[in-house]
Image: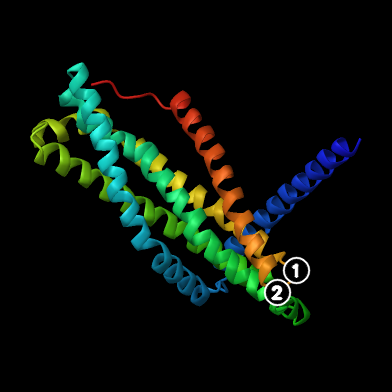
């Protein structure tokens, strides 16, 4: 009975958290759209948060994208040589990075670097009772704190996705063409033959969704911190783990829907 009670308690807590995140996402989205339309959006806070997120995540993004491009290029090149399909290396390498690699790396960086920093910042404000002070003064923390961060994370997420894709694809091009595995014309020709504009829209859409979800999780955990530094650290750990799991599940769902609904180009 104690095990059943514990499972039921965890399930109830999980459903409550999930519902609270949905409410937060709806409120933040509504505030963002309404405030932009009424020209009262906190653009100063948006720019500060966008620069903060860029400063925190840009260098790790580049440092992760380079070895990622190396690993993908080596593995794809080795398999292509084994099956005699070296001329298709550019297509497999480029489309794989564009559809899956870049959004996945972006999601991990958004959850790990951006989400943790955002959660720690809001958690510290909640622990110092600054969030409660905002409510006492009649200010809505979702409107003042979450909405600017939400829009900033979506924009920065798409920009990071471009950085990862360009860096990884350039690395793959240099390794394959520079190493003499395939000519530059064949490499680029195979990529342009199989790639299509929807691949880019898929990658950018994934990055925007990942930025949205990571922000909601981080803000929810940060705003609900009660206690001191230990509770802030626990909230950061929970936000990172939950964001990674959620982004992985969402990535699988989006990819499956894309494969089912969008016709693939045949060379």
Q: Which quarter of the rendering shows the N terminus?
A: top right
In the image shown, does 13 or 141 lie closer to the viewer?
13
Between 119 and 152, the one nearer to me in the picture? 119
* Residue under the point 21% across and 46% down: 171
Which residue sits at x=69%, y=66%? 231
* Residue bearing mark 1: 226
- Image-based side of 132 in relation to 182, left or right: right
Q: Specify the farthest residue to the right.
A: 1
> Which residue is pictured at 56% across the width and 71% down the height?
41
**How is the structure coloured here?**
rainbow
C-alpha distance separating marks 2 and 1: 6 Å
Classify mark 1: residues with Cα within 10 Å, few (<14), some (14-19) or many (20+).
some
What x and y, as percent, mark residue 115?
54, 59
Q: What SS does tag 1 mark?
A: loop
Q: Which mark is residue 122?
A: none
The quarter of the picture where residue 191 lies is top left
Residue 182's spot in the image, x, y percent?
11, 31
**Which residue is drawn at the image coordinates 61% and 61% (left, top)?**
236
Q: Residues within 10 Å of mark 2 (few under 14, many from 20)?
A: many
Q: Is residue 122 left or right of residue 159?
A: right
The quadrant of the picture occupied by the C terminus is: top left
Q: Are marks 2 and 1 in contact (CB under 8 Å)?
A: yes
Name the spot of residue 92 as percent of width and height, x first. 27, 30
Q: Position of residue 3 (x, y in %)?
A: 85, 37
Badge 2 or badge 1: first in the primary sequence: 2
Q: In this orientation, which residue lies closer to the viewer: 254 or 224?
A: 224
Residue 117, compared with residue 207, is above or below; it is below
Q: Secondary structure at mark 2?
A: helix
Q: From this viewpoint, is residue 235 visible? A: yes
Front position in the image: 179 or 205: 179
Residue assigned mark 2 = 127
């Amino acid at each position: 009975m104690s095990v059943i009670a514990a499972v039921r308690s965890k399930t109830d807590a999980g459903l409550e958290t999930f519902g609270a995140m949905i409410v937060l996402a709806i409120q933040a989205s509504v505030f963002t759209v309404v405030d932009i339309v009424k020209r009262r959006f906190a653009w100063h806070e948006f720019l500060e948060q966008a620069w903060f997120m860029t400063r925190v995540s840009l260098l790790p993004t580049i440092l992760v994208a380079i070895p990622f491009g190396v690993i993908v290029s080596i593995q794809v090149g080795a398999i292509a040589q084994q099956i005699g399909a070296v001329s298709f290396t550019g297509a497999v390498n480029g489309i794989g990075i564009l559809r899956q690699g870049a959004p996945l790396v972006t999601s991990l960086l958004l959850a790990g670097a951006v989400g943790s920093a955002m959660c720690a910042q809001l958690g510290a404000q909640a622990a110092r009772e600054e969030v409660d002070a905002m409510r006492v003064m009649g200010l809505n923390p979702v409107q003042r704190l979450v909405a600017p961060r939400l829009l900033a994370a979506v924009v920065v997420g798409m920009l990071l996705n471009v950085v990862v894709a360009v860096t990884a694809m350039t690395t793959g091009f240099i390794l394959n063409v520079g190493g003499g595995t395939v000519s530059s014309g064949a490499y680029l020709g195979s990529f342009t033959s199989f790639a299509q504009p929807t691949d880019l829209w898929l990658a950018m859409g994934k990055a925007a969704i990942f930025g949205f979800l990571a922000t909601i999780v981080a803000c929810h955990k940060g705003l609900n911190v009660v206690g001191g530094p230990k509770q802030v650290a626990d909230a950061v750990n929970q936000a990172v783990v939950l964001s990674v799991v959620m982004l992985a599940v969402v990535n699988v769902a989006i990819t499956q829907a894309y494969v089912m609904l969008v016709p693939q180009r045949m060379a």
